[in-house]
Image: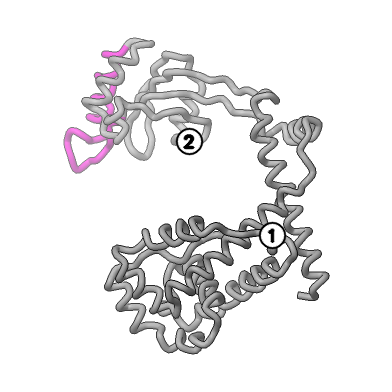
Amino acid sequence: MTNRMTNGMNGTARASQQSAGLAANAQHDSQPAEYRYHLLRAAADKFSCGLAALADDQWPQVEARARQSFCLENLVLNAPEAQAVCIPEDQIEQALVEVRSRYADEAQFRDELALNGLDLAALRRALQRELTFDAVIRTVGARHAPVTEADEQLFYELHAKRFRQPETRSARHLLITVNEEFAENSRATARARLEALAEQIKPGDAATFGELARNHSECPSALQDGQLGTLTSGQLYPALDNALFEMVEGAISEVLESPLGFHLLYCEAISPAKTVPFEQARERIRQALTERRQGEMQKAWIAELRAQTGK
């Protein structure tokens, strides 16, 4: 639920807010500050702006989201579990500092609060409610049944595809572009230039390939000596992709053509496809199962609250 207010805005943006949506905003002035905080948060989430900048047709979406989150917050804060939660003052202050940090100075921060129908005291109350809500939800989620090794093993077996890693290749690249407006980049000349460079490289000579890429390649990768990083099949133009995944380690491709021009590839390393072992995957599986069970526990608890209260 946490998303504390909106980002700081410059003077121009705030002036635009004041002239654009004050009429629509004014009708909400009488509502509780805690609810206005939900309106503001919904506007920030949905439209990345404050309340006064909302267009008339945006208000219904913001109001629907704010009503939903405010009602849920009230439901949780009135539950017995919330009575045992006490948020320390320093935690509220830290949340305030986080909000303040998004503004250029204290004056802009205060102006923004006022523009959205809030003051510092109201913001503190809203943040305390939000922090309490988050704490209760975490506490309820922690009631889930513990994840066992058998659970982890079953998940691993049922989702085996998730733990299969495809073959990857590390490659370098040298490009001469084709542009008929320039003689040195005409199709014939570009190919001849690349063929001349290819003659200077021997298989396995990554250093020479890198030097030539740095000095002659017309691809941004020239700044990294032609390095393209680790690639899986399908990331390059088809002609390049097909060639790279047929090459042996240390091999240099023939001259290849793409819509960009002519290319040389150097296959620097090959990592075969593999399956991540269970022991290596266990922590990730445990985390996924824990998060799922926490979410299920929280949803069930909220559903029970609603059934009890009729809300």
Q: Position of residue 233 (x, y in %)?
A: 53, 31
Q: Nearer the viewer, residue 174 or 121?
A: 121
Q: What separation in Å lies between label 1 and label 2 (alpha carbons)? A: 53 Å
Residue 210 % position (x, y):
30, 20
Going 79% across and 44% down the picture, which residue do you hit? 145
Q: Which mark is residue 41?
A: none
261 horizontally vs 165: left or right:
left
181 part of magenta stretch: yes
Q: Which residue is mark 2?
A: 235
Name the residue nearer the viewer: 39 or 108.
108
Q: Is residue 227 left or right of residue 2?
A: left
Q: Which residues are magenta?
A: 175-201
The residue under the point 81% across, 64% down is 304
Mark 1, Cα crowd under 10 Å, few <14 / some 14-19 / many 20+, is few
Please name the amino acid that badge 1 sits on. Ala
Q: How many marks?
A: 2
Mark 1 secondary-structure assignment: loop
Q: Please, what secondary structure does the residue beneath circle 2 have?
A: loop
Q: Is residue 112 left or right of residue 73?
A: left
Quadrant of the snapshot with the C terminus: bottom right
Residue 96 in sight here: yes
Q: Earlier in the sequence, mark 1 or mark 2?
A: 1
Residue 106's place in the image compared with 164, above or below, is below
Q: Is residue 94 magenta?
A: no
| Residue position for label 1 | 84
Q: Quadrant of the N terminus?
A: bottom right
